[in-house]
Structures are given as C-alpha cells and as structure tokens.
Image (tube, rainbow, N blue to C red):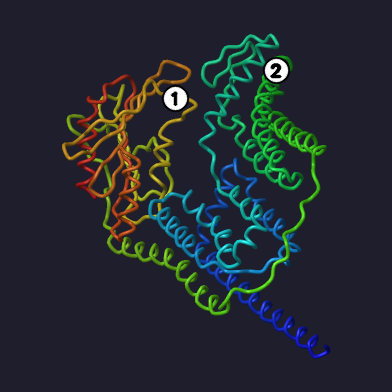
Amino acid sequence: MSSFNDSTTRGHAKTEDVTGHYQSAVHLGFVACMVVFVLLYSSTYLSLAATWADTGTFQYAFLIFPISAVLVWSRRQWLSRVAARARPSGLWLIAALGGLWLLGAVANVNLAQHVAVVVIWPAMVYTFYGPRVAGVLAFALGYLLFAIPFGNFMVGPLQTVTAHLSVIALKLTGVPVIMDGHFIDTPASAWHVAEACSGIKFFVATTAFGVLYAHLFFTSLRRRLIFVVVALFVPIIANALRVYFTILIGEYFGMHYASGTDHLIFGWQFFGTVLIVLFLCGWPWHQPAPEGPVADSGLPENAAARMRWMVPATMVLIILPATWYAATGLMASHNAAPGLTALPPQLAAVTALDEDANGQATPPGRDLDVHLSRRYGDIARPIQVDYLGADAGSDGPDMLNIRQKLYDPSAWTHTASPSTILAQDNGSSFVVLRLKQAQGDGRRIILYSYRIGDRWTGSSTTFKLEQALDRLLGMPAPTGLLVISEAGQTEPKALLPVARAAASSIMDGS
C-alpha cells in the first residue's frame, strides 16, 4: 500500500511539473508575440490614443485598457482552475486581423487599423490559451471593444432628437419657441444645438460604463440587458433636459449664465449627477457574484511540440503585414515624381484673378503635399478652384476626411441630394452639392472629384478601393481632391468646362 501511495504521489508531482512547464511556455510565447506586435504597430496605438485625446467624444477610452486589466486580475482565482490549451485555429483569426490592418493602412482607413490592434488581444488569448481561459476572460477581453473610436455617425441623429425633445419641453412649460432644423428661436435669443450639444460624449461614455456596471452587479442576462437599455436612453433624455434647462436659464436669468464657463460647468455637473443617480437606481437589484468555473486539469497531446511551432508561426503572421506595408512605402517613395506647383492662369474660357494667385484654399487640410487654390472669372461672383493632393505613397491626410470638411454642416444645408455628373467620355465624374445657408438666403454649388493616378472619380468607394489596391501591389499613385465652387444657383453643367480644364491641367502638371 505504501509503494502504491508513493507512486501515485510521484505521478501527481510529475503531472504538475509538466503542467507548470507547459503553462510557462504558453506565457512566454504569448508575451513575446504581444511585445513584438505592440512594437511593430506602435504607430497605430499612438494614432488610437491621439484619436481619444483629439476628439472629446472618446476621452473615456483612456480608461478602457486599465479597466480590462483590472478585470483580468480579478479573475486570477478562476484562471487557476482552468488549463491553457492552445488552439492553432486561432492563427486564422490573427492572419485575418493582419490583413485587416494592412488594408486599413494602404487605404488610409484608421478605423480598420484600430479594430485590428484592439481585437488582436482576445484573438491572441484564444490562440495561446484556448476557449476555457478565453471564456473566463470573455467580458474583460470583449470590453476592449469600447476602446475603438466608433460612433460619430450618431452625432446628427442625436442633435435632431435633442432639439425635438427640448422644444417639446419648452412648449410644455409655456416658453414661445420656433424650431428650424437644429436652430431654436426663443424670445431671449436664437439657440443652436451644435455637434458639441448632441450629447454624443455622454452617450458613449454612459453606454461603456453602463455595460461595465451591468456586468459587475448583475448575473442574470435579463437584468443586464434591461440596465444596458436604460443606460442607452437615459443620456439622450438627460441631454435634452440639459439643453432645456440651459435655454430656461438664458430666458429667465440672462444669457451670461447660460453660456461660456457657467454653461460648461452646468453640463458636466448635470451629467455627473445623472450618472450617479443611474448607478444608485440599479443598486437595489444587484445580485451576488457568480461562482467560478469547474476545475480543469490535464494537457493535450504533444503540447510542448505545439508551442514550438505556434510561436514562430504567430511571429510570421505578425511581422508580415507591417513588412509588406513598409516595403511598398519604400517603392512608392523611390518612384515619386514632382507634382504640380500652380494652377494655370486660364481654365477653359475663364481667366484667373491676379490678386488671388496665391490665395488660400477653402477646404481645410493638413500635411498635404500639394495645396493649390485660385479664383477665376468675375470678381463679383468668382469660381473657386482648389486642388488638395498627396504624392504617391504619401502618408498624408485622408482625402475623404478633407471632403467632409468642404463646408460647415451647421451653417449650410443641402437643397437636394448629392448627384453625379460625367465630366469626360472616359468615365470621369464629379459629385454635385447644392447648398443653402441655414440662416439666410445664400446659395452655393460645389463640384468635387477624387484623383487616383490618371483617373478621376466621384465615388468615394471606388477611390478607396483603387487607392488600396495600388498601394497593396506596390504601385501607389498620386491622390487628390479637386473642388470647384461658386456662389449662387449656377447649373452644374456651366461649371463642367472649368472642371475638365482643371483636371487636365493637374494631370499634365503632375
């Protein structure tokens, strides 16, 4: 009996030694691969942090990674009950994320790159540690998705909802009010529900922290979903009330109390109070923490051998996209040619205004390789021509982002849906925007087209796809945005000769 017990003890000790050795190998492989990944893609992480800092909407995201780390640490007792079982199938997900990052890099789409460098963390955990460990850390890893800056498309709808709800509240309390779009007129003043007043900051932050609260204090799926839904609607209603109270303060106590520093302080105090009240209201229904997973043990066959080939394979998948992007960038810089230095003094039948030979471009842009602007025709109603471009393979600004800043949406509204007109027989096209001042009778017409090499297109999708394909194949071409604009209600066809001449001049000069 004694010899049997001794052999059993030695068998358990041997199993624990093998298990500990395997766990250490997994830890070392995971850490090594993630260190290499973070170093290679550090510029994308810096871009992610810059987006958090520059757009106030996502400043809360600085807390997401630390919160996730704390959540992982809080599950350390659960993790001790489950064994790491690597899943080579996760390499397909790592390869897909590398491809997503590469496509985002060559197409200059930050969102794709940001998704890749965030989702890589749960993908790597699943690949190295397997489904049991990934399941224990599911929420901590999934919570990282809130670090992705996404949701600005909701600004417009939130502005509209806020304006309507605040006007309803004003009417219910007897304040005379007229609403025109996002503009609200009252006896005291004219108010504008601007983008900063849409409540998008509070909406995304409340959603993120509401999801965290639901996970920490509720265990049933039903209660978690109810609380998250409430956390989605509360900030919308609260923001409408903030706008309502701001207007009331201006009406009854004076505009100096409803604007400036007092306006900002009131906003933050109001939102902070709403968030605390929301969490306090959820507390009476909180539930005890769930029990941990059933203890697990044992190793898959050939575990050590699997680690020996999985780590190098993962390294290859990590290094390949960054290497490919760097190599095509070097090819682009080697093939770069001098670009256009000035717009011509005459386009079609119109002549440039001499005093505008060095004029500033209307569309804003930073870090451009080419930035040309000139006015043509009658000085009383000139035709403005702007060309904003980037050399082949340049890491300059995204042309789609520049196009979105051609006009201030709070000051101008569309009088018709954007349309497309053909400018050349070869399929070149321009998009037509017809604009009207939000407050006033001013009108403006804008024609714009994207350049990709020797081609022009009004389609942002076509532009992005061709730009990405050219760079991916190591044959990047110069890109740009040509903008023709004129005040008034000019017919688009009247500006087409100028647009054609400007496009031809840019091609000949580049």
Q: Residue at x 41, y 41 (%)?
A: 402
Q: Residue at x 75, y 44 (%)?
A: 218
Instruction: Bin the neighbour count of mark 1 within 10 Å (Cα to Cα): few under 14, some 14-19, many 20 and up.
Output: some
Residue shown at 47% from the left, 25% from the top: 411
Residue 472 lies in quadrant: bottom left
Measuring from the top left, give residue 123's x and y in whole percent.
55, 60
- The three-letter code of the residue at mark 1 reads Trp
What is the C-alpha distance between the residues marked 1 and 2?
A: 27 Å
- Image quarter in which the N terminus is found: bottom right
Judged left or right of residue 340, residue 168 is right
- Compared to residue 150, the image places residue 261 above or below, namely above
Q: Residue tagged by mark 2?
A: 248
N-term-proximal mark, 1 vs 2: 2
Which residue position holds label 1?
Answer: 412
Please indicate whether residue 135 sits to the left or right of residue 368 in the image. Answer: right
**Direction from residue 466 to residue 198 in the image, left or right:** right
In the image shown, does 76 or 115 lie closer to the viewer? 76
Task: Give x and y (percent) for residue 197.
Answer: 61, 29
Return the residue nearer the eye: 171 or 359: 171
Secondary structure under badge 1?
strand
In the image shown, does 231 or 397 lie closer to the viewer? 231
Task: Residue 28: name its quadrant.
Answer: bottom right
Rendering coords of residue 382 (x, y %): 30, 26
Between 510 and 401, the one nearer to me in the picture: 401
Q: Is mark 2 on a helix, strand or loop?
A: helix
The quadrant in which residue 342 appears is: top left
